[in-house]
Amino acid sequence: MVHKAFAYLDVDHPIVAWAVYRGTLVSVAAVGSAPTASHRPVSMMFAGMIQHQANARFQNELLIDAVRRQRYAHQVSRLTGMYFFTDHDEAKAAQNWGAYFRAESLSEVAVYSASPRTRVDANWITAAPLDTHGRLEVSDLSWIDCYWMGRSCDNRPVWETIVHGRATVLGTELRRRAYDVLADRFPDALDTLEVSRLAAEVDSDLGQTVALMQQIADDRYRIDYFLDMRAAEEPGFLDRLAKHHGATNIRDLQPGKPTFGLPDFRPFSCEFTISQEVDSGTGYSLPTVHRQVDI
C-alpha cells in the first residue's frame, strides 16, 4: 500500500543527498542481507549519534526503545524505522525542533510500508524532562508508555509515523539541491550517481547508500558507508536498465570515460568502543560511546 507523506531530508549530508537524488529511501529492515555475517545495517539516525558521540541522546533513545521491546514489540523501533508526517501542517510544526527541520528540507514522499505503521505524538519526546546532562529524568518514565500507546501528549499533537519499508522522493526541488551537493563533493562520481538513479527507476537497489556496523575486536566497532552494487550481478538487471524509457542524463554518464567514479564516503567512517553502565533508577544497561579514530 502506498501512502503520501512528508519528510525532512538533510541533503547537506552527502550520503543523504545521494539517497535523495537517487530518489528512493530505504529503511534498515528493507536493506536486505549484509555483505558478510560480521556486518549489520544501521540507520542514519543510529550512525549519526555514534559519529557525533551524542551519548545523552543515544542513551535516551536506547531507553525509549527498551520500553518498546518489553511492552510494545509490535511498534516500529525509532532506531531502525523511517519517520514521516502524514499531515503537512503537522510537518511544518516540526520546524520548531531546529537542526535540519527547515522548510527547505521538507519534501513530499510516497511511502511503501512493509509493516504496520507506528503513529505516535512526537511532543512526548520534545517535552520529556531531562537532567543537567541532557539525559532523561528516570524518576517517572510513564510518558514512554503513553508515547508507544499512541496517546496525544497535549491538545496540539505532532503526529509522526514510523515505518519499515521504502519511500520515493516526489518533486524535483530538493533533488536538485541534493545533486548540487554531490556535484561539488564527488564530481568524478556523477556517472555512478546517474546509473544509481536509473536503477531506482527500474526497481533495483543498485547504488543505494547503506551504513554498516562491524565488530572489529572484542571491544571495538566500526561504521562505514557503502554503495550497494550487488544488483549488477542479478539476472535481468542490465536488460531492465537497457529498456528504461525515462529521461537520462547523458552528460553525467560521460560516454567514453574508461572507468566509473565512486563517492569517497571514508570521511564519515568512525571506529569506537562502548562501555556499559547499569542505570540505578531503571535497571537498564546504558552504553556509552567512545570515539577512537577519525578516518
Image (tube, rainbow, N blue to C red):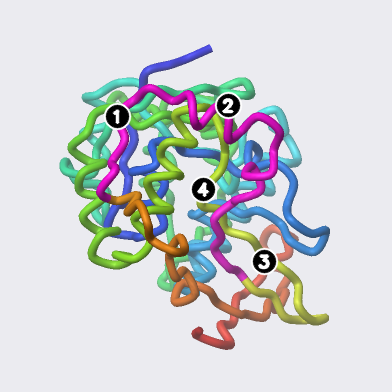
Q: Residue 5 occupies which quadrant of the picture? A: top left
Mark linked to residue 149: 2
The picture places residue 152, in percent across and down from the top left corner, at 42, 25
Q: Is residue 87 above or below residue 154?
A: above
Residue corresponding to mark 4: 207
The picture places residue 56, in percent across and down from the top left corner, at 50, 67
Tell me if residue 224 is in the magenta stretch. yes
How far, Cα to Cα, is label 1 from label 2? Answer: 45 Å
Pointer 1: residues within 10 angstroms few (<14), some, or many (20+)?
few
Determine the residue positioned at 39% across, 42% down. 22
Determine the residue positioned at 50% across, 85% down. 294
Could you tell me the amino acid type at mark 4? Gly
In the image, the segment drawn in magenta is: 223-251
Q: Earlier in the sequence, mark 1 or mark 2?
A: 2
The picture places residue 123, in percent across and down from the top left corner, at 37, 38
Residue corresponding to mark 3: 286
Q: Residue 170 occupies which quadrant of the picture? A: top left
Local SS, label 1: loop
Could you tell me the amino acid type at mark 3? Leu
How far, Cα to Cα, is label 1 from label 3? Answer: 50 Å
Local SS, label 3: strand
**4 vs 3, front mark:** 4
Q: Earlier in the sequence, mark 2 or mark 4?
A: 2
Disc 1 + disc 3, Cβ < 8 Å: no
Determine the residue positioned at 69% across, 58% down. 282
Pointer 2: residues within 10 angstroms few (<14), some, or many (20+)?
some
